[in-house]
Structures are given as C-alpha cells and as structure tokens.
Amino acid sequence: MQITFGRSGGIVAAPGLTIEATLDLSEGHPRVTDPASGYTRDLSSQEAQQVRQMIDAASFFKLPTELRPLNQSASPSRPTSIADQRQYDITVRTDDGRTHTVRASETMSSELEQLSPGLGKFLVWMKQECETIMNYRRQQR
Amino acid sequence: MPKGPSPLDFLYSSPDVLINIAKKGTTEQRDAALRALDIDATLRTNRLTFSLLGGALGRQDVSGAAPKVQRTIYDSGNTQTLPGKVVRSEGGAATGDVSVNEAYDGLGATFDFYLSAYQRNSIDNAGLRLDASVHFDEKYDNAFWNGQQMVFGDGDGVIFNRFTVSLDVIGHELTHGVTGSEANLTYQGQSGALNESISDVFGSLVKQYKMKQTADKADWLIGAGLLADGIKGVALRSMKAPGTAYNDKTLGKDPQPADMKHFVHTSQDNGGVHTNSGIPNHAFYLVATAIGGNAWEKAGQIWYDTVCDKQLKQSASFAAFALRTSVHASQRYGATSTERKAVIDAWKQVGVKLSATMSVGASGG
C-alpha cells in the first residue's frame, strides 16, 4: 500500500508551506519522502504496522473525496466553519491498483475517526509528520 | 454475501431522515441509522457543551440595550485544546502576555469598526460574544475561525511571528464570522476565494479605520509584521499588487494573481481560496482608490451591502458577486454615479465580466 499525503492552505497558504509527501508502506523499506526538500525518514516495522492499521481500506474507499465538518452548530446563524484551516489530502493506492483520495480540514480528527476507524489517528500522525518535514525545511535556510 | 448499510451511507442525511429510517427501515438500515444518529448526537453534544461552558454561541440579550462588546480571551497553553483557560474577560486589566492583549484589543477594534462604519452589532448583528484562543498548539503558523471562535498560533519564530501581531489578521478572522452569518459563501473555488477576499477587505479596513488612513495612504497589505526577521517579504498578501508580498527561499513566491487571465486552477487549499482571492482583492483596491477618501465609507459600504445581500448565493462566482456590487453601488449612489463607474471599471480591469448588458446608466437592479 502506498499513501500520498499533503497539506495546503491556512491563512498563509504559501507555496513553501505546502507539502506533498509519499508514505511507502511496502514490506521491507517503509519510508516517508518529501521530494520538495529531499527529506526522507525510514519507519520502524512497528510504526509501519501501526500506520497500516490506521487505514481501513474498506471504509476509506467508501468516503466521499471532499469531507466537511458535519454542520451541527447549536445556533442556526453560526454555521461550522473551516475558514483558514489547513487542508489535508490523503490518497491511498492499494497493492491491487485501486486509488482513492479524501480531503479534510485539520480539526476533523474526531469526525474522521468516527467515519473510518483509525483515520482520525492517521490525521494526527500526518500532522506531526508534516511538522517534522517543515522543521527539516526550516533547517535548510 | 450482501453487506448492510454503514453510518457512512447516511453521512449527509438529516436527523429527521435518520429517525424515519430507524422507524421504518429494515433491521440493518435501522442499526446503521441509529449508529449515524449516535455520531450526530455526539457532535451536537460536544458543540452544545462548548456553548454551555462559555463558548461563543451564547448571544447577549440586546433588547433595548446599546451594543456593547463582550470579549473573552482564552489560553490554549500550546496544546490543541479549545477554547482553553480564560485569561482575560471584558473589562479586565491588561495581562503580561502580549498575545492576550493584542487579541483583546484587536477584537475590540474590529467590533468598533463594524459598529461605527455599518451599525453592525458584532458578528451576527445581535451582539454575539467574541471569543479567541491564543497560544494554540506549538509553534503554530496559522490562525483560523472555526464557526465559534478565533484561534491564533504563536508562529515558529523562524518564518513567522505571533499571529495576533497584525490587526488586519484579527479583523480577517472575525470577518469570516460575519460572512458566515450573512452570505455564508461556500469555502471552495470562486465562492471560497470571495469568502477569503471579503476577510482581507474588511481586515484591511479595520486597520485603515483604526489608523484613520485614506485609501491613498493605506499599505493594502494583509499580515504586515507577521513575517519574521530574515524572511524576504513584507506581508502575506498585497491587495494593491497581488503576487508581490514575498519571494523567499522557504516561503516560496507569493502566488496570487491580480486578474482572471492568471486564475489558478488547483485542488489544494479548497481550490486555491487564498490564491485567487487576489483577483477580488485587487478589484476592491481599484474601487477604493478610484473613489478616494476613506475606503470604508463608500467602497466598503458597497462590499458590505453585497455580503448582506440575500440574493447572493452561497456558491456565488466572481461574476455574480461583481454584479451585486454594481447593483448596490447603483442603489446607494445612483446608476450614473462615479462610485458605480468605479465598481464597473475595477471588475473590468481584473477581467471579471458582470454581464453582457451591464453598463453605467443601466438600472442594475
């Protein structure tokens, strides 16, 4: 299984803050790569296994591409908003060639967890990995 | 073996529909609908709890009372917890925390601006409390509006300073609340770029109003002071010259277009909402400087009337928004007015067509 994940948007939305990374979960060499900066990180077999378990392909492939927070505001005049929140993209390619992309905003981890068990945890993992990539880019200044 | 429905199958169903399915559906449909209702109820409860605990959802009783700002600043303590701990309430003394004080003062300045310029009583025009959390997350390079409150990060100190440093950024976030209460433009594609642009427009006007600047004296920058020392740039965006705010090794080059010829098609950032906002941003700048004087008085009034226009659809395109600005310029200042001409000329200059039959002197209504 190969996963590409990305981060974009936020009030800044600068090209240099946009991330498009690859997570290769193939047996043997699980690794994260950020082509824009040259960042790579090898995952331990334990971490790779944990990440695999976060993606429940059966439910992930049933999700619509664009996920929005469920609009459950207690006040009709106060709709839930994603304004200036960062957008995270997750594209999963299974070993049999199926591909699906899901997009969500940064505060939706609990909703994702309920929609596809493990996916909220993956969002948290992805946000942390994006920060690690940004730290690497900052050090390159 | 056929599989029963899952809660995902009812993702966009209303509670009424789910209850009906639970009553009348098959056993499998009923179970899935009940699970979906459980998710729905959890989310409702979370948000209601936030409100009852002092969140932004509670409205003031303003019956007969003069509009009065009601601010609460919270400290997230460098976690992702919202709203966090109350650190300054309305009327409370300044604290030793510059972010807390900037947020408090910025919310006050924005409230004053909307009330003085457009007689608007807070975000919802009904005295909604203004809540903001500072110190969100660690080295967080962002600020956002979640429908209930404003959230500000400290910045990483390498690329960004704290996100409360720019008054226009605070005005920008609060204006997302205003737009949500009025046109509620869908945060995707052109309507999303309009949503962003409206926040930039009124964020800039909050600053201009506070500094008593006329259109020709304003810097028309969004986020001046936000970039850390050593970053090559002056701000996040320039309404005067979109695409010129920064050009830096780490940040990259400001990607904003100033006209439709350079419209950016992308799936990132909800369809480039922060990128293509450069086009309506520049249109507003052109209108404001063509009219002259204080930008919030006429150009701002036309844009404000448009945001509050019930005929403006949530999915409005640039052209639809532009047409309504022309209508409101006509209604406020006359069909042959210089204000309406400024509006039509500005949209033409950025390449947005209002309508084939649109011209100065037409009724526009």
Image (spheres, coloured by chain):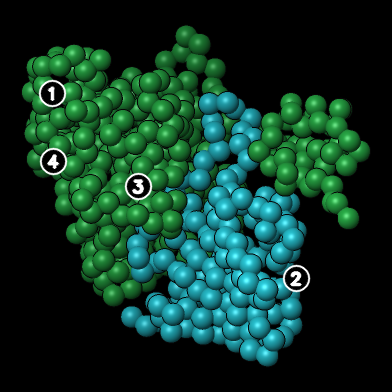
Residue B359 is labelled as 1
Question: Residue visible at 82% across and 42% down?
Answer: B32
User: Which subunit holds the residue at mark 2?
Assistant: A
Comes first in the chain, label 4 or label 1: 4
Question: Residue visible at 22% across and 38% down?
Answer: B352
Chain drawn in green: B
Report, in whole angstroms, how far the alpha carbon at label 4 lies from the one at label 3. Answer: 27 Å
Q: In the structure shown, which secondary structural element does the residue marked by tag 3 occupy? A: helix
Q: Which residue is mark 2?
A: A53
Question: Residue visible at 30% across and 69% down?
Answer: B252
User: Which subunit holds the residue at mark 1?
Assistant: B
Whether residues under marks 1 and 2 lie with C-beta atoms below 8 angstroms apart, the answer is no
The residue under label 3 is which amino acid type? Answer: Val
Q: Which residue is mark 3?
A: B169
Comes first in the chain, label 4 or label 3: 3
Report, in whole angstroms, how far the alpha carbon at label 3 lies from the one at label 1. Answer: 35 Å
Q: Which residue is mark 4?
A: B349
Report, in whole angstroms, how far the alpha carbon at label 2 lies from the one at label 3. Answer: 40 Å
Query: Which circle, 1 or 2, is nearer the viewer?
Result: 1
